[in-house]
Image (tube, rainbow, N blue to C red):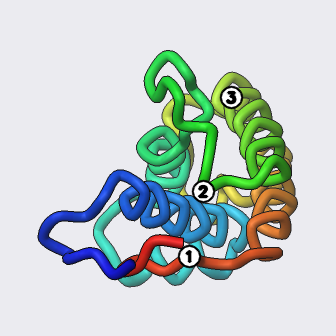
């Protein structure tokens, strides 16, 4: 069933959010992508990487009750939960404020975040992105 972009169904919205999670994981998993993002935008990428997960993640059930269902596979849910634990650990153990990107990328904590994002991304890559204009 094709749904109009003007009135997306809840299912279609979830598929789009899942795609944004994949995009986030691609950024968090790649220092090259982070460097490119920093050079092409005005945002402070270390803060953006931390804050963007908080924008999209469906793991925090107090904020997103009932979100951990379709379109996520059981493996994707487990991967997001594992990544979220690492993300919280990194927040606790990195300096406040975070230093410039090149310095941040040398922190062992940031490298740990990258590895966790890479692992979660591999899980999402099994199915890849879902359509943004058609429910599956």
Q: CA distance from mark 3 to mark 1?
A: 27 Å
Circle 1 is placed at which residue position? 130
Q: Are marks 1 and 2 in contact (CB under 8 Å)?
A: yes
Helix, strand or loop at disc 3? helix
95 relative to 107, above or below: above
Which sits in the foreground, 66 or 35? 66
Q: CA distance from mark 3 to mark 2?
A: 24 Å
Residue 106 makes an appearance in the image = no
Residue 108 makes an appearance in the image = yes
Q: Are marks 3 and 2 in contact (CB under 8 Å)?
A: no
Query: In which quadrant of the rendered view does residue 132 lie?
Result: bottom left
6 sits left or right of 127 in the view: left
Count neighbours of disc 3 (C-alpha within 10 A) and say few if under 14, some if 14 to 19, many if 20 or more.
Answer: few
Count neighbours of disc 1 (C-alpha within 10 A) and say few if under 14, some if 14 to 19, many if 20 or more.
Answer: some
73 sits left or right of 32 in the view: right
Q: Residue at position x 77%, y 30% from top?
A: 85
Q: Residue at position x 82%, y 38% from top?
A: 82
Helix, strand or loop at disc 1? loop
- For this orientation, the residue located farthest to the left is 6
Q: Is label 3 or label 1 in front?
A: 1
Q: Which mark is residue 69?
A: none
94 relative to 77, above or below: above
Circle 2 is placed at which residue position? 71
Q: CA distance from mark 1 to mark 2?
A: 9 Å
68 relative to 124, above or below: above
Quarter of the figure that contains the N terminus: bottom left
111 sits left or right of 133 in the view: right
Circle 3 is placed at which residue position? 88
Query: In which quadrant of the rendered view does residue 123 lie?
Result: bottom right
Count neighbours of disc 2 (C-alpha within 10 A) and say few if under 14, some if 14 to 19, many if 20 or more.
Answer: some
Helix, strand or loop at disc 2? loop
């Amino acid at each position: 069933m094709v749904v109009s972009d003007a009135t997306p169904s809840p299912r279609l919205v979830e598929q789009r959010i899942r795609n944004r999670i994949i995009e986030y994981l691609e950024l968090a998993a790649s220092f090259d992508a982070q460097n490119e993002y920093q050079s092409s935008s005005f945002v402070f990428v270390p803060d953006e990487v931390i804050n963007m997960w908080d924008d999209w993640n469906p793991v925090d059930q107090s904020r997103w009750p009932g979100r951990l269902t379709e379109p996520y596979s059981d493996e994707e849910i487990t991967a997001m939960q594992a990544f979220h634990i690492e993300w919280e650990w990194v927040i606790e153990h990195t300096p406040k404020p975070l230093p410039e990107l090149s310095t941040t990328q040398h922190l062992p904590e940031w490298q740990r975040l990258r590895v966790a994002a890479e692992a979660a991304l591999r899980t999402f890559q099994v199915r890849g992105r879902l359509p943004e204009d058609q429910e599956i």
